[in-house]
Image: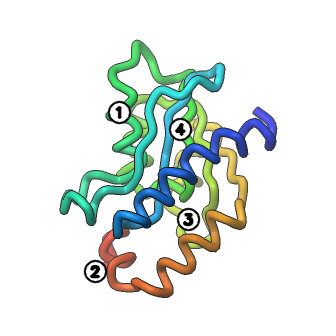
Amino acid sequence: MNHAEASALLSVAFEEARVSLAEGGIPVGAALFDASGNLLGRGHNLRVQEDDPAMHAETDAFRRAGRQRMYRDKIMVTTLAPCWYCSGLIRQFRIGTVVVGESQNFRGGIDWLRENGVEVIDLANQECISMLADFICAHPGLWREDIGEE
């Protein structure tokens, strides 16, 4: 997958991040695609909106995609490097590729995913970096709580 293709997929996740922010939540979005680039499910962080610590963006997108026969050929796209919880989901279901909007504000488990054979494409997208940096600056306590650093 080239940079332009990955960036096109990221636009769906970025739209979801904007939705979460507009709802008063953490601005992280995700989408699950098949190998041909067909959208299977999209979602955003709902931890604040639903008072549910397990509803991260990747989890929401994964659940909305419904059951798939296999996941090795699927592409998880997320505006932020997956946390350890979401990295575990990616490994558990053997999702083969992860497109990350950014890992500057939060590194998450991308090194571990790479070490375990997952293709990780980190786009270092400035819109993703800025959106989350602005959110962290405005809501540092909420951000620390979201990543488990209460």
Question: Residue 64: which disc?
Answer: 1
Q: Position of residue 96 (x, y in %)?
A: 56, 30
* Residue of label 3: 107
Give the left or right position of residue 3, taking residue 103 as reference.
Answer: right
Say what secondary structure mark 1 lies in: helix
Is 74 located above or below residue 105 in the figure? Answer: above
- Judged from this view, the residue extending furthest toward the top is 69
Q: Check disc 3 and give the amino acid type.
A: Arg
Q: Check disc 4 and give the amino acid type.
A: Met
Spatial distance from mark 3 to mark 2, Cα to Cα? Answer: 18 Å
* Residue of label 2: 150
Is 32 located above or below residue 135 in the figure? Answer: above
* Residue of label 4: 76
**Count of numbered tags:** 4
Spatial distance from mark 2 to mark 1, Cα to Cα? Answer: 29 Å
Residue at 76%, 32% in the rendered image: 1
Question: Closer to the camera: disc 3 or disc 1?
Answer: 1
Question: Residue 29: which disc?
Answer: none
